[in-house]
Amino acid sequence: MVSTPTRPKASQPRAGKPESPKASTPAAPRPTVARPAASRPGASGPGASGPGASGAPGARPNLPARIRGWYRGFWSALEGNGTSRNGSTYYLILGSTLALTAIGIMMVLSASSVESIAAGKSPYGDALKQGMFAAIGIFVMFVLSRINVVWLKRLAWPVLGAALVLLALVQLVGDEVNGNKNWIDLGGITFQPSEASKLALALWMATVLARKGKLLRRWQHVLIPAVPAAGLVIGLVLLGNDLGTAMIIMMITAAALFFAGVPLYLFGFAAVAAAAGTAVMAITSSNRMCRITSWWTGQSCADGIDANYQATNGLYGLASGGWFGVGLGQSRQKYSWIPEAHNDFIFAIIGEELGLVGTVVVLVLFAILGAAIYRVVVAQEDMFHRVLAGTIMVWLLGQATVNMAVVTGLMPVIGVPLPFISYGGSALLMSLCAVGVVLSLAREQMAPAIRPKRMLKFGTKKAGKTTRTKTARKRT
């Protein structure tokens, strides 16, 4: 008995149908092409297209997958993966900064004109001063944006030393305004050294922490010399009775240590120490305790002083603005209801005159600025660049957050200006210089063909030629 070979299933005839003569010949094997998992029937996964899969036509992806997709898409867009080369980050930082500065000059003119007229001064005086400092600051910002940030390391120690000397001079020859001794009069122009110390400390800490590098895993190298130098700056600012500026400098110090990769458990000890120190300073000052109790209870202090008067009228201004505001220049609260409305409480005037829309525009501009600087921070591989950019980001956004929280009643009243918008030449100048440093880092991320050219090269070409000459000599 001879057994006949069986045919493959694909070539066997169906039941009930006669087999054709052609079917008896073995069929040639068909070439198989590997299909991707996303197109195979029954494949599972986010990209599956089989029956019941989330990517099939007419089928909607499940909610967790969609949330994960949105989350990844949000961080990808925020970090600017692949889009920083076209200059978007650079121009987002530049555009939002210029827009905030322009809004600030306009609102300083509107908020300060009434009190200037009442004092017998020109209604345009404060706005012209602010515009002058803005022009100087924008020029310095563009200069800093065209240089290599690495060269700023040479200025770290001299700049910090100069800031400490100026802070010490404030206590000797400085002017006291509203209980705070923070200003030095330079030929009719007042300058606030504590604002310059913010940028000086950020540059110095980035330089020192970058040199230490991996040694920062040990707490001894974290403390020395970074923490004592920052503590000295904070102490000199506190001697001038300016707790608000001291809080921002503490924030700058913490940000520099964080972006340098300091172990997180050290921040717990630092937070406890900072909270204890803040509590001691609040308890030992009747003015600070009055502000805290007035904010917490909404009532006047025991001596009849209403320390919450400015914040209460600021809320009245925000409430009366409605959706679109009462109109530019039409604020009622700036008629001495909010003392010095063009300074720390200018955000309330924005809400009153431009309404909720105006405040949202300011918030969106700060959000754009923060997101663009964040793109610069996450793209840095060098520790000096990362610490410097991250510290500047925390400084500007943290100060803006504190100011808005005070105006909206979420925090007690402390003297912290709104960056780029509040009146103050030294604050505006230093903020624009800080943005110039970040712009220099953003410029390096751009494609060489569209990258703005440097203004100052500091002998880079010469150094390159010397290196090439030495290499040629060795080869010969």
Image (cartoon, rainbow, N blue to C red):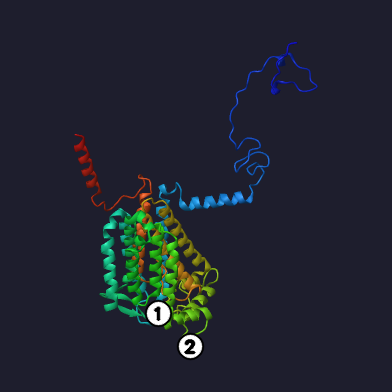
Determine contact: label 1, label 2, CB under 8 Å: no
Q: Where residue 302 is drawn, which disc sits there?
A: 2
Q: CA distance from mark 1 to mark 2?
A: 30 Å
* Residue type, mark 1 in image: Glu
Q: Nearer the viewer, residue 209 or 18?
A: 209
Residue 271, given in percent of the width and then of the height, sits at 44, 68
Residue 365 is left or right of residue 436, and the answer is right
Find disc 1 in the rendering and name its residue.
115
Q: Is residue 384 visible?
A: no
Q: Nearer the viewer, residue 264 or 231?
A: 264
Residue 12 is left or right of residue 320, and the answer is right
Residue 426, given in percent of the width and then of the height, sits at 33, 69
Please identify the residue farthest to the bottom as the structure is shown: 303
Q: Quadrant of residue 96?
A: bottom left
Please identify the residue farthest to the right as the structure is shown: 16
Assign a secondary structure to mark 2.
Answer: loop
